[in-house]
Amino acid sequence: MVAKAARLSTYGSAGRVKFGDTSNLPQDSRQAIQAVNEHEIMTGDGGRFHPKQVLVREQAAAILVRVQKLIPEVLY
């Protein structure tokens, strides 16, 4: 959802996913995870992404701030 909301390109990203716990996910999910990782929006923890873990408010706030930094100032 984050990659789509931030309009990140996910084309060709799935082959480079470096998280050990994402291999069983669909390709489009792996591509989105790689895209948010490449833009340092979500970075995982110790080689794991924890795709099934519940997001807490602090993490959500950090994600929003990182996504906002990608938006050119001209647009707001």
Image (cartoon, rainbow, N blue to C red):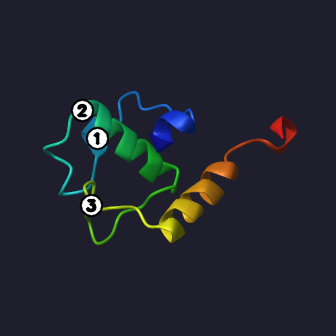
Q: Residue at x 51, y 67 (%)?
A: 57
Pointer 3 local density, CA inside 10 Å: few below 14, some 14–19, many at least 20? some
CA distance separating discs 2 and 1: 5 Å
Element under label 2? helix
The numbered mark, 3 or 1, whose residue comes first in the sequence reads 1
Query: Relative to 72, is 12 above or below?
Result: above
Give the side of residue 26 with respect to residue 55, left or right.
left
| One can see residue 8 in this view | no
User: Callout 1: few (<14), some (14-19), or many (20+) C-alpha neighbours within 10 Å?
Assistant: many
Q: Position of residue 43 (x, y in %)?
A: 42, 61
Can residue 60 be seen from the camera position used here?
yes
| Residue that numbered label 3 is attached to | 50
Which residue is depicted at the point 71% across and 43% down? 71
| Residue appearing at x 57%, y 39% in the figure | 6
**Quarter location, residue 44:** bottom left
Distance of label 2 from label 3 (alpha carbons): 16 Å
Type of the residue with mark 3 = His
Image position, residue 15 (x, y; %): 26, 38
Instruction: Name the kind of residue labelled 1 in the image.
Output: Arg
Count of residue discs: 3
Secondary structure at badge 3 equals loop
Residue for badge 1:
30
Q: Nearer the viewer, mark 3 or mark 1?
A: 3
Q: Residue furthest top?
A: 11
Spatial CA span between label 3 and label 1: 12 Å
Q: In the image, is 76 to the left or to the right of 38? A: right
In the picture, the disc for residue 27 is 2
Give whichever of discs 2 and 3 has the lower sequence position.
2
Q: Amino acid at mark 2?
A: Gln
Q: Which of the numbered marks, if any, corresponds to residue 72?
A: none
